[in-house]
């Protein structure tokens, strides 16, 4: 077994509790007949994970990027989302649209949660500040990794992304030990693998990355649960250097990156993960095979 965590609302709720009348009932009434279960699910995802690009939304909920664009345009007109195109430096082309939760979307979410809007903590300035944050590309990268897994699950009925925790939720849960960029639980059939994500952009020294693993080891010692750490790297050279530096890591670690994807349609679920400490020529492994590294006290019979 793996670390026990409460279930997240990661799937569209087709039978939501009707929202209670609130002071902004006019907004809610105008949206009641316009929002689908998919729309409400995306509102919840945007609240927890802050931002998605159009291709990521296609991975999550639409059959094509064109349908995703049209879907976001409709929600933007309703005030449910806000869509911005981030300006890239000259010569780098154009960025995809980035989508954030809008004021009306936040009001819908508060109603679904059964709390006053003020208690939700929504502030438009803070939401839109992500568009200017130096952490935007990092956050979009993390969300893209999980969105790609969800896309695999949409094509394969035996697969499922059962858990997807944001950096903030992880920090609140494991404060004092670790600060991962995400936590996930992936199923293929009855087999599941729990994992932490460290999204490496290459800006930290190898020593800094290695030092983070101490916290994971301390957490495993404290609660008796071992969970592999997945490090997503920006290049093959960075991955090779990390693998060399992390040999003998105190917890199971596997590395990969865009350069390792060679099976169309499988993305992060495919045979792209290199377990640290193995010979460089060892074949890469599928995500689900890392389940062998998940251990909890009740597993040790």
Image (cartoon, grey):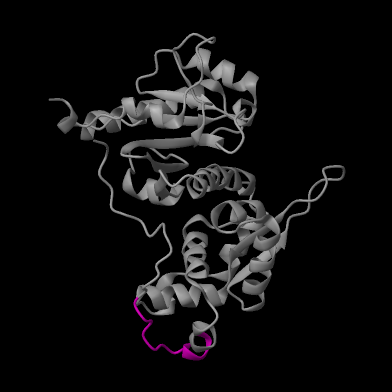
Q: Residue furthest right?
A: 91
Q: Residue furthest left?
A: 301
Quadrant the C terminus occupies? top left
Q: Position of residue 292 (x, y in %)?
A: 32, 25
Residue 8 sits in quarter: bottom left
Q: Is residue 233 above or below residue 138?
A: above
Which residue does the image show at 46% across and 58% down from the upper left? 48
Q: Is residue 87 visible?
A: yes
Residue 234 sits in quarter: top right
Q: State left or right for residue 251 relative to residue 57.
A: left
Quadrant the N terminus occupies? top left
Residue 141 sits in quarter: top right
Q: State left or right for residue 107 relative to residue 63.
A: left
Q: Is residue 18 above or below residue 155?
A: below
Q: State left or right for residue 52 relative to residue 187.
A: right
Q: Position of residue 16 (x, y in %)?
A: 37, 74
Dominant SS of magenta comes to loop
Q: Position of residue 56 (x, y in %)?
A: 61, 51
Which residue does the image show at 56% across and 36% down from the upper left? 267
Question: Is 49 covered by the magenta stretch?
Answer: no
Give the magenta part as a residue range: 17-27
Q: Position of residue 44 (x, y in %)?
A: 46, 64
Q: Is residue 177 visible?
A: no
Question: Is 21 covered by the magenta stretch?
Answer: yes
Q: How many marks?
A: 0
């Amino acid at each position: 077994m793996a670390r026990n965590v409460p279930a997240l609302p990661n799937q569209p709720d087709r039978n939501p509790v009707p929202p209670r009348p609130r002071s902004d009932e006019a907004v809610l009434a105008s949206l009641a007949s316009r929002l689908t279960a998919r729309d409400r699910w995306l509102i919840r995802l945007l609240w927890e994970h802050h931002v998605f690009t159009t291709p990521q939304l296609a991975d999550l909920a639409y059959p094509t990027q064109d349908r995703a664009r049209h879907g976001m345009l409709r929600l933007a007109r309703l005030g449910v989302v806000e869509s911005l195109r981030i300006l890239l430096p000259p010569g780098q082309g154009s960025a995809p649209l980035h989508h954030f939760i809008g004021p009306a979307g936040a009001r819908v979410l508060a109603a679904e949660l059964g709390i006053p809007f003020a208690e939700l903590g929504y502030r438009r300035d803070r939401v839109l500040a992500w568009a200017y944050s130096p952490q935007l590309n990092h956050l979009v990268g993390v969300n893209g990794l999980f969105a790609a897994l969800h896309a695999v699950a949409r094509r394969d009925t035996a697969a499922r992304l059962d858990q997807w925790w944001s950096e903030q939720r992880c920090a609140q849960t494991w404060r004092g030990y670790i600060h991962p960029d995400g936590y996930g639980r992936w199923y293929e059939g009855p087999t599941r693998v729990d994992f932490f994500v460290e999204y490496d952009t290459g800006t930290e020294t190898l020593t800094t990355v290695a030092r983070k693993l101490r916290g994971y080891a301390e957490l495993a010692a404290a609660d008796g649960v071992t969970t592999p750490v997945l490090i997503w790297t920006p290049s093959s050279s960075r991955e090779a250097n990390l693998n060399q530096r992390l040999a003998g890591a105190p917890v199971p670690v596997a590395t990969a990156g865009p350069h390792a994807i060679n099976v169309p349609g499988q993305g992060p679920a495919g045979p792209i993960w290199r377990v640290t400490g193995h010979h460089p020529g060892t074949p890469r492994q599928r995500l689900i095979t890392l389940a062998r590294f998940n251990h909890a006290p009740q597993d040790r019979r």
